[in-house]
Amino acid sequence: MLRSLSLHNLALFKKQEIEFNENLNVILGETGAGKSLIFDALNFVLSFKTDKTLLRSGEESMRVDAVFQPVSETVKQLLKEAEIDDEGELIVSRTLHSDGRTSSRVNGMAVSQSFVKALASELVDTFLQHENLQILKSKNHISFLDKFCDFGTLKSELSKLIDQQKQAQAKLNSIGGSEQMRLQRKDILEYQIRELTEANLQPDEDVRLDEKIKLLESSERIVENLGQVLQLLEAGANGIVSQINMSAKLVGKLGDIENLPELRERLESAQIELDDVASELREVLSKADSDPRELERLDARRDKLKALKRKYGGSIASCLETLESLKQQLDELCSSAELSEKLSKQIEELKNQEEKLCESISDIRKSAAIVVKKRLLEELADLGMKSTQFEVTFERKEISADGFDDVVFTFSANKGQELKDLAKTASGGESSRIMLAMKNMFAKEGDYKTLLFDEIDSGISGEIGNMMAQKLASIARRDQVITITHLPQVASAGDNFLKVEKFVENNSTISRVQSITGKDVIKEIAHIIGGDNVTDIMLENAQQLYQRGRKFGRS
């Protein structure tokens, strides 16, 4: 619960320390004095909102520090997971700079806004007029209803079954899934293996194919050019090869003069090399036949290889590797039929067990819903809403750790009107009273939450005001309550009184909060009753209200 709040340069507050107690804290003061700024400060430090207008005019930064103690086990676990020391109290700090930058710390350690928000959801509930509150949202209705249920071990048993089913399903999926999935997977594998096998792929076939196609596409130019080259090399006695041969013979006739024998050998070697070149050129020329049908066949083969490479990994090598892998998968799939059947039966049995547990959980919820309806209508009748209709509706959803119930609270303020989702139907004033009634019903010991009520008593008076005061006092015995009020009955039920006043000092407007006790409290209650002109009768009336308020929630 909130022990203290420190404000630095926040709007009308220059520097302010505010202490709270563990029960019902009542914030009093004139309209515009700055009462709601206290809630704005708490919303800021807990990262619910960032409002640059809260920065006091002319200042470079503002800071809010909030101290909570004690905190729930859930909060302690969040601190542990974030490796933040639990020092017996929780100190949350947040700073806003004039350029819009913000920073947050928890027990001195820098943290993210999302982490602070996670903490905040466990520390504070805000109950503000016209605000869409957590307790009204349909997604939260099931958790509220479950506070009235004793499920024993049913939920933990259901969670174990769901985990077992997930494990069995994962194993089944790894070997092909259900019998139907397995057969479908088998068909796919067989098709892919057949496609790759019939393609009769050869290593580096695509490279060789590209070379051959390139040759055929250039055949006309190759035939023309190579024909000319061969003509030069082999044109009878005038061909280069014949002339080199004749040159070698003529040099040989000169005998052993100087280095002529060596030169003759070189001419003979040149003849042999050119003969070999001519032979290879003739072979290239023979392959360069421009056969359109052969080129079409090769193009079709290249397209086939490209399609397979796109489908199976990008290269001929990856296609061949995939083929071996697919064969292995098919072998494993064929040998896993027995295990698949066993797992499928196990999953079906687990689903049956889950269904039975969910039915038991649902039955408990439906019994609790009857109690919730009765108690809530009684609470609302006490608060002047005697014509209210309320139902807990159940729809079926997929099984989860909560069961198969989708729970929604439906509401109508008047008899004869259609019941609709609570969050979409209740007006601001109705929401305030509904939330107060619900919190009184659903409050749980050990949560150590701080509940903020900002003028939820607006528009209420007389005996209904007394009932609201009693319920706030009752809640404050379990959770800390901080409320801003203009209703004397609510103010009279307080345990700790904080008065907010606004002053002008040195041509600057400031607000201050001070704790008041005794006669000062009576004067403030009288002021709420009668305005500025407080009479002795008003003071006496205020004293009586205050004394009656001492009995609320304290029996």
Image: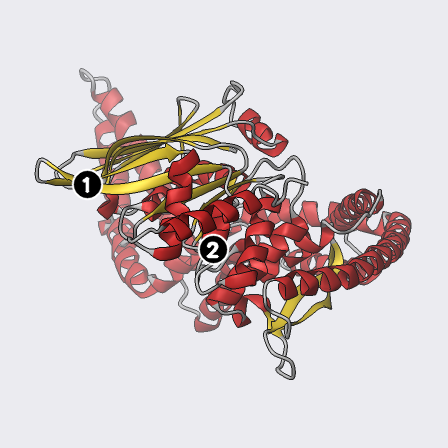
The amino acid at mark 1 is Phe
Residue 326 at x, y percent in the picture: 70, 50
Mark 2 and mark 1 residues within 8 Å of each other at the beta carbon: no
Q: Nearer the viewer, residue 170 or 134?
A: 134
**Residue plotted at (63% across, 72% down):** 388
Q: Quadrant of residue 142?
A: bottom right
Please say if 215 is above or below 86.
Answer: below
> In the rendered view, how is the structure colored?
secondary structure
Q: In what quadrant of the picture does the C terminus appear? A: top right
Please say if 159 is above or below 396.
Answer: above
Q: Say which residue label 1 marks.
A: 503
Q: Quadrant of residue 44?
A: top left
Q: Nearer the viewer, residue 28 or 323?
A: 28
Task: Using the image, tell me which numbered label, if any, was put on residue 316.
Answer: none
Residue 469 at x, y percent in the picture: 55, 51
The amino acid at mark 2 is Leu
Q: Say left or right for 46 vs 552.
A: left
Residue 507 at x, y percent in the picture: 8, 40
Q: Say which residue label 2 marks.
A: 209
Furthest-left residue in this view: 507
Q: Is residue 335 visible?
A: yes
**Residue plotted at (22% across, 29% down):** 251
Q: Say left or right for 32 vs 172.
A: left
Q: Secondary structure at mark 2?
A: helix
Counting the numbered discs, the total is 2
Please say if 387 is above or below 26.
Answer: below
Q: CA distance from mark 2 to mark 1?
A: 93 Å
Label 2 neighbourhood size at 10 Å, few (<14), some (14-19), many (20+)? some
Residue 376 at x, y percent in the picture: 68, 61
**Residue plotted at (60% across, 29% down):** 77
Upstream in the sequence, badge 2 or badge 1? 2
